[in-house]
Image (cartoon, helix red, strand yellow):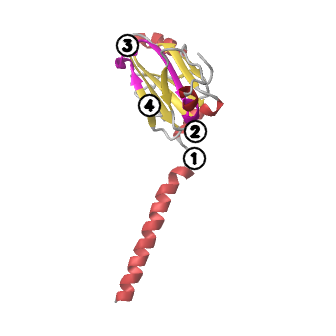
Amino acid sequence: MIRTLLWLFGGALLGGIIHIVVILALPALADDTLWRRISVLDARDKMVVLPQILPGTPNPLGLDPDLAYGLCQIDLTAGPAYLSGIMPDGFWSVALFDSQGTITYSTTNRDGIGQTLEMGIFNADQTRLLARQQLDIAEGLLVVESASNDVFILVRLAPPHQAMRQRFEADLARVACGTRTP
């Protein structure tokens, strides 16, 4: 009887370990990741305005169809990245994501920034150089540290009326983004 219980306990324990290993390994084995979907948009070091999501059409990134979106993909190993532009007069937000799709920083125009957005994204090594004043940055630059080198920035604009969407998207297209100084 005890021997049977030990076998059952051992089998359940081994099954639990296998189950946990498989669950933790599956995301690493996935081919269709968020980073891969964003990479095909050709947004490396430039702002790309995403097309409007229309009802009944595929929405692989799960975006709100009422908002206008701009996306910029960055590799911080090439140097610090900068996001610079004048945002339209309306609600907007900026979010910094790591390659896994986790938001590492987010801000909106309601944080007192105003309509001018000047943001610098630095990895840990670049932040240390910045602290030692070995990197020159413009005064008033919003400094954001990223834990990873592969990041993407998503800018969301909320046009108050659908008739203003085209103007908002044009403003979004003029935003400079990438590993070059603004």
| SS assignment at label 1 | loop
Closer mark to the observer between disc 1 and disc 3? 3
Mark 3–mark 2 CB contact (< 8 Å): no
| SS assignment at label 4 | strand
Q: Please, which residue is most extreme toward the right here?
A: 78
Mark 4 to mark 3 CA distance (whole Å)? 21 Å
Q: Which mark is residue 105?
A: 4
| SS assignment at label 2 | helix
What amino acid type is highlighted by mark number 3? Gly
Q: Residues within 10 Å of mark 3 (few under 14, many from 20)?
A: few
Closer mark to the observer between disc 4 and disc 3? 4
What amino acid type is highlighted by mark number 2? Arg
Query: Label 3 belongs to which residue?
Result: 90
| Residue at 50% across, 21% down | 119
Mark 1 to mark 4 CA distance (whole Å)? 26 Å
1 or 3: tag closer to the N-terminus: 1
| Residue at 59% across, 27% down | 80
| Residue at 49% across, 61% down | 21
